[in-house]
Amino acid sequence: PQGDEDLHPCLVVRGFPATWKAEQVKLVFAVFGGVCAVAFGQDGDGRFAKVQLKNFDNMPKAAEQLHNTKVGDGEFIEECVISCEFVDKSSGPQIRMRSLFLDELEMPDRPDAAAGPNDRELFLRCLPVAECSEEQIHSWLEGFGPVEQLRLLREGGTSDGARTGLGYVLFASHGAAAACAGELAPGPETAG
């Protein structure tokens, strides 16, 4: 879910049925003073909800009392056993949100398509992020022409994750992008 990366501290809830919406989650946590935010997501372990209570002080207590507990009345709230874990920034989030860019996917047979006159953005690999600052990489790319935007990708898709050496650069003109692509294109000795 977008926009919930900063939903901390929060309760991470799992084990609820697919029919549950925010209303059912709010009813379960009503006895703890009410809910101010609910965000649903999915990861390798299945569907989860990040829940933030109106009274932050009640969150550890809610996690302790609801973890591995049967909830629901069978009428308004489908019965189930939920897991409930309290997560705050100091202990680090247990759920990692990650942005995945198509250029990161394995694609052994990329289409052989020529760049169009409006193409100005390049996906870059093997950027020297350990040796150079973002400003230095930006200055180096400016050698090919004016740069409108540089985005260095980070682990976990967060602003504080480690830089991966991958990035996107948007040049002001197609000519600058073509010059950069021509210079950085792998030669026969580095292809493959």
Image: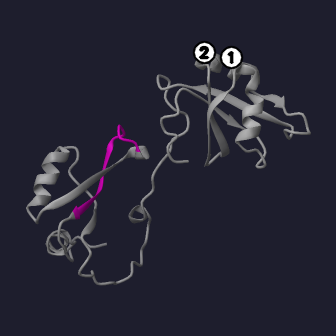
Amino acid type indicated by mark 1? Lys
Q: Tell me the quarter of the picture where residue 130 sits.
A: top left
| SS assignment at label 2 | helix
In the image, which is nearer the foreground, mark 1 or mark 2?
Answer: 2
Tell me residue 126's x, y (percent).
Answer: 26, 57
**Secondary structure under the numbered disc 1 in the rendered image:** helix
Part of the protein shown in magenta: 158-170
Give coordinates of residue 171: x percent, y percent: 19, 65
Q: Which label number is shown at residue 94?
A: none
150 to 21, vertically: above or below: below
C-alpha span from label 1 to label 2? 8 Å
The residue at the point 14 percent across, 70 percent down is 176
Q: Amino acid at mark 2?
A: Asp
Mark 1 near mark 2, Cβ–Cβ under 8 Å? yes
For disc 2, the marked residue is: 57
Picture quarter with the C terminus = bottom left
Q: Find out whether residue 162 is within the magenta segment.
A: yes
- Residue at the image position 66 percent from the left and 29 percent from the top: 35
Where does label 1 land, which residue?
Answer: 61
Lateral position of residue 14 relative to residue 169, left or right: right
